[in-house]
Every structure is written in C-alpha cells, then in structure tokens.
Amino acid sequence: MTRYIMTADLRRCIGCQTCTASCRQTNATPPGVQWRQVLDIESGEFPDVRRSFVPVGCQHCGDPPCMHVCPTTATYQRDDGLVEIDYEKCIGCGYCAVACPYQARHITHRVEFAYGEQPMASESARFDARRMSVATKCTFCVDRVDAAKENGLTPGVDPEVTPACVNSCIAGVLAFGDKEDPNSNVSQLLEETQHFRMHEELGTDPGFYYIWDKK
Amino acid sequence: MKIKPWHQTNWDARAAGNFIGGGSGTGLLIFAAISVLAAGPASGYRWQAGLALVLVAAGLACVFAEIGRPFRALNVFLHPHTSWMTREAMVAPFLFCSGAVAIWAGGGIFSTVAALLAAGYLYCQARMIAAAKGIPAWREPKIIPLFIITGLVEGAGLSALIAALQPGGAPRWLAAVLLVALILRRLAWKTYHETLERTGAPKKALEVLGRLRGNFERYGQSLPEMLLVAALFFRSEQVWLIPLAGVAAVLAGWTLKFTIVARAAYNQGFALPMVPVRGQGQALPGVKPGWSK
C-alpha cells in the first residue's frame, strides 16, 4: 500500500510564504483562499520568546472526518491516502468544512479575482467554474501525483510529480513521499527526527508530520 | 493569519433554523401522537401534526437556502453509510408521507408511525451536529442528549400551547410530562456545559455559553418549571399557566440551539504540541492559543 504524506521541518521554516504563493499560482485559487498557509506563532514570555512558522493545509487524514460526514460522497479517499473532492457531486453544504479540525476547506460563492471582478488574462485562462459554491482544499497536487504513474517517476523525488509547495520551498522545509516505503525520503526523515502531528488527539490520523528536533 | 479559534462561517442562522424547525417539529409530532393515544383523535391531532410538518419543512427550507448548489440537492441521498445528514434526509420523505396520511386520517396507526420516524429524524439531527469534529462546542458527545431532550421539550411546549386553544385546554398529564422533560433538559444542559468547561474548549465559545447560561436557566428553565408546578397544584383555576410555560420552554430551546449553532461555533484553531528548536536552544512545551485548557 502507498500512503502519501508531507513533512514540514519546523526547525528550518522562515515563514517566507513562497509555498503559499506557489500553491496559489499553481492552483489558481481566488483571493482569500489559500490551500497552503504558513502560520506565524509567537510563544513564550520575554526574554524567552519564540517564533514558529508552521505550514498548514489539508492534512489528508487517514480517517478523514470530512469524508465521513459528506452526504454526497463528493469527498473521497484514494488508495494512496489522498483525500479529494469531486466538484461535480458536491452540493456546497459546508458540512465537511465544519467537520475539518484543520480549517482546510474553503467555499467561495462569489466570482472574484485579484483586481476585482475583471480577471487578468492568466486568471481568465485558468478560471474553473466547477469550483464555485463547492468545497475546495489542497489536493497534494493530485494531477502531478497521477502523472508519476504514467511517466515512471517518483513523487517527492522528481519535481515534475511533486506538489508545487514542496518544489518551491527555499529552505528545504517541506518534503513529500510514500510513508509506507521505508526507503522514501519522508520515511528516512521521520526515522531520524522527532515529530508530531497536529490535533492528533482527535483521531484523524493526519498525513502531515511536523519535525521539531533531532533524535 | 489566524491562530486562535475563530468563528466558523460555513453554517449560519440558516443551519440553526434547521435544528430549530426540525427539533421542534419532530418533538411536536411525537407529542401529537401521544395525545392521540391519551385522549383520542379529538385531541386536535390535525393542528398539531400540521404545524409539526410545517416546522420540519421550514427547517429543511433553511438548509436548501444555505447550500451552494441547490440544484444538486438530491445528491444528499448518496452517503447513508456514514453521513448523518444523508440519514436525516432519507427519513424526511417517509416522515412527511406518514404525517400527511395521519393528518388525513385524524390520527390512527400512522400517527404512531410518524412519531417513530420523527424520533429517528431528531436522533439524526443530534448525531449530525456531534459529527462536526472541527467545532469543539458541537463535537462534545453530551450535545446529543441535549439536542434530543430540547426537541422533546419544544414539542411538549408547542403541544401544550395548541391544546390550550382547544376546548378543554391543556391536559394535566402534558404539564407533568413537560415538567419532567424540562428537568431532564436542565440536567443535559448542565452536563454538557460543565463537560466543556472541564475538558477544555475555545475560550470565546465558553464565553458565549457562559453569557447564555444565566438567562437560559432563569427564564428558560426555572420560570416554566415554576409555572408548571403552580399549574399542577392549582388545577383548573389558572389555565393559562401551562401554555405560558410551554411558550417559555420553546423560546428557551430555540435560543439555546441558535446560540450553540450560530454563536458558539468557534473552530479548533491551531496548536503546537512542541515548540521547535530554531537555531540555538531547546525545544519547549507546546502552545494552544485561545483555549481554556
């Protein structure tokens, strides 16, 4: 079995938001919708204060609450662990959005572009009416992952078949790969480091691992 | 970028309308059937069941007004395996058919069938909100008995109000049942609220529920309870006490559900179980901004 996951090395992230920009560029998300975001979390008390930059988005959970509640089966889980949405089935009820503990789902009801109602040429070319008034979220760049099978490439290793945010990361924070393959980049990273998953106590089995220290 | 829990924007007053209409409507349909069993078809079944179906339909209309793609609404039936929204939707047509036949017949066996389906619909609604794992105030399992019992209280309250408009007025047995249901709702609310406070929730959600608590317990619980006790003691001299208690109980139930669904629905926010090492220093214990615990 394959289980694609993403890792984020929090020791390295500088909060540059390049992954966010790359995701928006790749997926043509409307203003205010960011499938990949980087949080800026301040903690501690003076003089021992910390700033942590934390990439978030859909965690492609192993036990996704969004899928269980979806009344239409529009949200589904693939054999490789990716949680996807069939835009043609979704009724935009928002139940998945309130079931997701990661605030990863977005529903846009108004057509909006970067500079108002008038799209730029690039926006016009990539506008997808199917995404209006339905749930959308990070897909782990599923089209690229699917292309890997056809081309004999490896997601997470070959950039052509690796999610855009991972490719764009300037600090080597993000990694993508198959957790079930012990030789994959992500398996090796998890083997060598200490990590956690966000809101793991909710039993969602998230597929996004945060590295916080060496072993 | 928000870190602390913020109020979700996907389900608003229209979603609350579904829980209000569905809960009150199904509760009323149940008590309409009980009235038939207790007093026969002369108990005003048609009025009660008719209003009940209107309330459930109004709730569903609220949902229809909220979904982004209403012309695909029939897709809601596709996932009965795990989705409580699908299950609620599947019960609805049978509920309306049996209710309509029972109204036509003025009671009879179909009133019992409609009441059983109403109970199923109410249960689905309670499970539906509890399955929303992203909203801490909703996913607390104690919300299930709370939503069920408040639906029944609202049903009994409306039943008392309608019965009061009929010859003979509201029966004493209904006052007694409403009083018991109110006491159960008080217990369910107290357990739900205290569990949230004990186990931890978004601070703002607790603030909203804390603000609700005083007025809800005073005017939505104690007031109708006292009115009903007085009605049971003073018998027929004060016939207005029972329907007045019913109105207070219903309004309190609607306020409770509106507040939980549309005002206390703060999401999970973000948290770090460990604060990472960056450059020099040690990793630190985690942070969970905006949470009570």
Image (spheres, coloured by chain):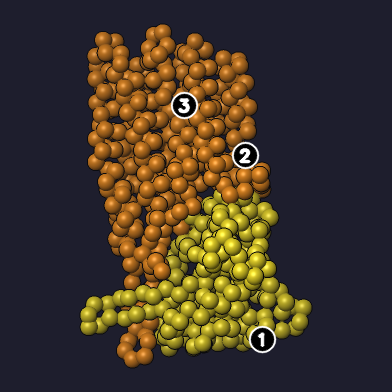
Q: Quadrant of residue B278?
A: bottom left
Task: Label 2, secondary structure: give it.
Answer: helix
How far is the residue under mark 2 from the one under mark 1? 47 Å
Judge by depth and name the residue closer to the eye, A92 or A175: A92
Image coordinates for residue A28, horizontal then vertical, percent = 60, 69
Name the residue that disc number 1 marks: A158
Q: Quadrant of the C terminus of chain B?
A: bottom left
Q: Amino acid at mark 2?
A: Met
Q: Nearer the viewer, residue B109 or A22?
A: A22
Q: Which residue is mark 2?
A: B90
Residue drawn at (39%, 66%) of the image: B2
Q: Amino acid at mark 1?
A: Asp
Camera sees residue B136: no
**Chain coloured yellow:** A
Residue most extreme to the right: A150
Identify the image quadrant of residue A73.
bottom right
Which chain is indicated by disc 1?
Answer: A
C-beta proximity under 8 Å, tags 2 and 1: no
| Parent chain of label 2 | B
Pick the residue in front: A62 or A157.
A157
Q: Residue at x 25, y 29 (%)?
A: B223
* Residue B83: % across, % down: 58, 49
Which residue is situated farthest in the left direction here?
A46
Disc 3: host chain: B
Chain corresponding to orange in the figure = B
Residue B21's mark? none
Residue that carries the numbered disc 3 in the rendered image: B28
